[in-house]
Image (tube, grey):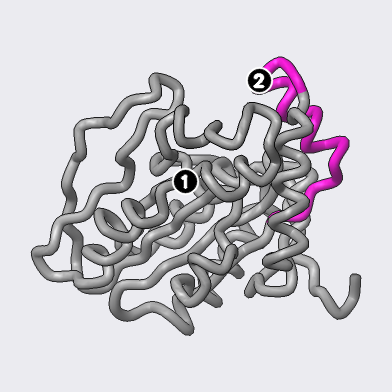
């Protein structure tokens, strides 16, 4: 079992309790959104554990498991910010094999990943089922874009200064985000305003000490 600092545990438990109070029954969807380097996967994994601490069924997925093939992602050119924003992910596949069957419940099978972006190949789909009351937590970029509006019961936006995000990306990938990615995320922020659409905003500058913040006090 993961160990959390008291503050982190308190923030996660508060979010989990709020979510379950409002969306504890049926099949529900929770998004963890943010720029590259915000710590989305790390945060979503930790939240999933706390959300399931009293037996609530939780499933995890990342939009990274639904990338398009490399040839489609770069059809507008290797430096195209518009291409990064518009062509990175296969949202039709995401809905077809994960969202819609998960929403159906019962014996409908769903898969939480369909594409290996590192190998640029489809993965063997591992079909799952779950109980009637269950939550799917999805992490990734662009989750509040127009194509996905109306999907999420609850959305968390992770707030992180650019310099911290760059430092994390350098540690993870050996370099900060390329301009294609920075500009593509700027297009997303301008079009979707995900911070305003989020149910909760969390300052995730410190992995061990996340802090919920409120838009009307920022």
Q: Give, as a single range, the part of the protein colored magenta.
A: 158-175
Helix, strand or loop under label 1: loop
Helix, strand or loop under label 2: helix
Seen in the picture, residue 196 relative to 58 is either above or below; the reply is: below
Would you name the residue on which mark 2 appears?
173
Q: Please say whether residue 170 is one of the residues in the magenta stretch.
A: yes
Residue pictured at 77% horizontal, 51% vertical: 186
Q: Please say whether residue 30 is one of the residues in the magenta stretch.
A: no
Which quadrant holds residue 130?
bottom left
Q: Most extreme residue toward the left, as rendered?
A: 107
Looking at this view, is 32 or 207 the one in front? Answer: 32
Q: Most extreme residue toward the front, as rendered?
A: 76
Seen in the picture, residue 92 relative to 147 is either above or below; the reply is: above
- Which of discs 1 and 2 lies nearer the camera? The answer is 1
Residue 150 horizontal/vertical position (percent)? 48, 77
Tag on residue 89? 1
Numbered label tally: 2
Looking at this view, is 68 or 172 the one in front? Answer: 68
Decide whether the magenta segment is chiefly helix, strand or loop. Answer: helix
Residue pictured at 44% horizontal, 57% vertical: 137
């Amino acid at each position: 079992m993961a160990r959390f600092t008291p503050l982190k545990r308190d923030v996660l438990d508060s979010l989990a309790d709020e979510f379950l109070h409002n969306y504890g029954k049926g099949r529900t969807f929770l998004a963890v959104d943010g720029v590259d380097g915000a710590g989305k996967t790390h945060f979503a994994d930790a939240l999933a554990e706390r959300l399931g601490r009293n037996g609530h069924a939780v499933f995890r997925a990342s939009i990274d498991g639904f990338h398009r093939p490399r040839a489609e992602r770069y059809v507008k050119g290797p430096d195209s910010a518009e291409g990064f924003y518009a062509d990175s992910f296969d949202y039709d596949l995401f809905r077809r094999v994960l969202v819609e069957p998960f929403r159906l419940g019962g014996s409908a099978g769903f898969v939480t990943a369909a594409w290996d972006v590192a190998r640029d190949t489809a993965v063997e789909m591992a079909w799952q089922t779950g109980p009637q009351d269950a939550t799917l937590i999805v992490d990734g970029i662009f989750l509040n874009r127009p194509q996905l509006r109306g999907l999420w019961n609850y959305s968390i936006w992770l707030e992180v200064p650019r310099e911290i995000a760059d430092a994390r990306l350098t540690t993870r990938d050996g370099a900060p985000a390329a301009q294609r990615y920075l500009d593509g995320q700027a297009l997303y922020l301008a079009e979707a305003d995900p911070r305003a659409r989020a149910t909760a905003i969390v300052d995730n500058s410190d992995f061990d000490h996340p802090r919920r913040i409120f838009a009307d006090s920022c």
